[in-house]
Amino acid sequence: MSGMKGICGIALRGTQAVSVEVEVEITGGLFSITVVGLPDTAVKEARERVRAALRGIGLTLRGRIAINLAPADLPKEGALLDLPMAVGLAKAAGRIEYSKHALFMGELALDGRLRWVRGAVPAAVLARESGAPLYVPHANEQEVALVSGVEAYAVDTLLDLMLHFSGQKTLPRIESRTFEEMDFAADTDFADIKGQFAAKRALEIAAAGHHNLLMTGSPGSGKTLLARALKGILPPLSDEEMMEVLLVRSTAGLPAEPGRARPFRSAHHTASAAAICGGGASMRPGEVSLADRGVLFLDEFPEFSRDVLESLRQPLEDGSITVSRAAGSITYPARVLLVTACNPCPCGYSGDPVEPCKCSPSALDRYKRKLSGPILDRIDLHVAVPRLRPEELVSLDGDCGERSSDVQSRVKTARQIQQERWKEMGYHCNAELPEKILRKHLNIEPDVKNFLANTMKSLRMSGRGFSRILRVARTVADLDGAEKISVPHVAESLSYREGCAFSGSGWGA
Ligand SMILES: [Zn+2]
């Protein structure tokens, strides 16, 4: 950015930092401080912190002081601007001589120590683009080090920074680190989950083609555990994806996570739309953005409000979410693999091998209607996760199937095949394919056409339902290493069609 000059701080716009120039003027007269460009409540708090910290280094402010934070109309956060305001005041009061352009960030404690702030990663990216040095609280060092090519310094206290400028002390320059290939241990390995082979296979297909998934099963059937295990079979984050994840976490005020594991976030149905979608008074990314490049898990899916489900449409279609507020709207990344789970009926035991269902037919009907909705169109895979019978649990002892790492390598290969195939059309995975591209480039065996025509007729399937079957069949074929989609691929895909997970509960297909 070329417009940056003098002593600057930052404001956050989405996951980007925008430079804020701090101009200070001190004139004679009675003591007063006015700050232009910050909301009143933020000014009051920031003024107290900055004044106290300056007093701590022996600088008592006098006279009429005007601080201008430009551009004035940019929404700002007081705490992020404590340090540049203190430096600007120290300079205007003649305490330091400083004429270079630099970016400062940090919240000041009353004793002059610098506190961790959100937004250090976006600030480092801005510093790199503008070629200016960056001064950040020591506590932010780890994440700033992950942005290469930045001249950044870690600061413990305001006094240290003053001594650095007067040449009496040299602040350590932050050494950049690279994202090393780190093995990460997933919370749950596939081999730790007994049985549930159909659900595990559905997870593998979801991971391979980036298909959103709905799991239906009674309480205690292990839906949450299965969802968590998805993290371990997804391919690791690339450098570019890791930077995006890092930017979102820093903006949200969360520390960087080690390793290349994809994010896994679960949201409760009582969470507010702001908590899930982002925004709110403090303008932070929501769960759907914290899950960017990873998994968003919504348990008890039918209990979520229509508003929340409706607002998830955009991220599922565009891979980003736009939050509106008075000063305009901002966009956060939100490319998620959506995993949803629900009970088969209100009491939870429809189709259960042991517990009987106590729901009335009308209650079942209402429940089923609640499940249909805007998001369901975006969920390609439906799978039943039944509770295991006690005798099954015993007979499965010692046989839990493959480890996550084995499944992950098949997923990686299938993803590579898709990337190669759709590269020129600009798609990454089968789930992204729009209808017309899908039908044009299907590459199916001749006998599949007849099979499909017959099935469509007998199942009375809609056009949309049909496209979902084809997308999933393409992924099944890719996992199989097959160039052409054949009847078994389509047959497997049909077993994950909408409503199928309920067939065991007497709802029919
Ligand atoms: Zn029931």
Image (cartoon, rainbow, N blue to C red):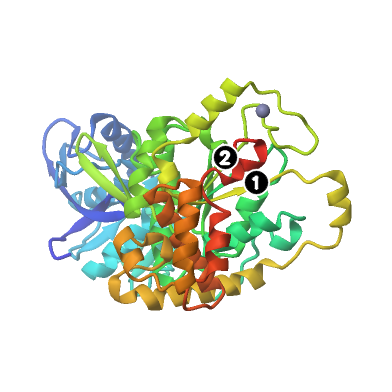
Picture coordinates of residue 262, whole percent (x, y): 52, 61
Asked whether mark 1 and ligand 1 are closer than 8 Å, the reply comes as no
* Depth order, front residue of 408/356: 356
Amino acid type of the residue that numbered disc 2 sits on in the rendered structure: Asp
What secondary structure is marked by label 2?
Answer: loop
Picture coordinates of residue 294, whole percent (x, y): 49, 57
The quarter of the picture showing ligand 1: top right
Picture coordinates of residue 307, whole percent (x, y): 38, 32
Figure quadrant of residue 97: bottom left
- Quadrant containing the N terminus in the rendered view: bottom left
Picture coordinates of residue 361, whole percent (x, y): 61, 23
* Depth order, front residue of 157/394: 394
> Circles 2 and 1: CB distance less than 8 Å?
yes
Whether residue 187 is visible here, answered yes or no, is no
Tell which circle, 2 or 1, labels the residue nearer the N-terminal end.
1
Q: Is residue 411 above or below residue 25?
A: below
The residue that disc 1 covers is 223
- Quadrant containing the C terminus in the rendered view: top right
Figure quadrant of residue 29: top left
* Depth order, front residue of 211/445: 445
Residue at 60% x, 36% y is 507
The residue that disc 2 covers is 299
Amino acid type of the residue that numbered disc 1 sits on in the rendered structure: Lys
Label 1 neighbourhood size at 10 Å, few (<14), some (14-19), many (20+)? many
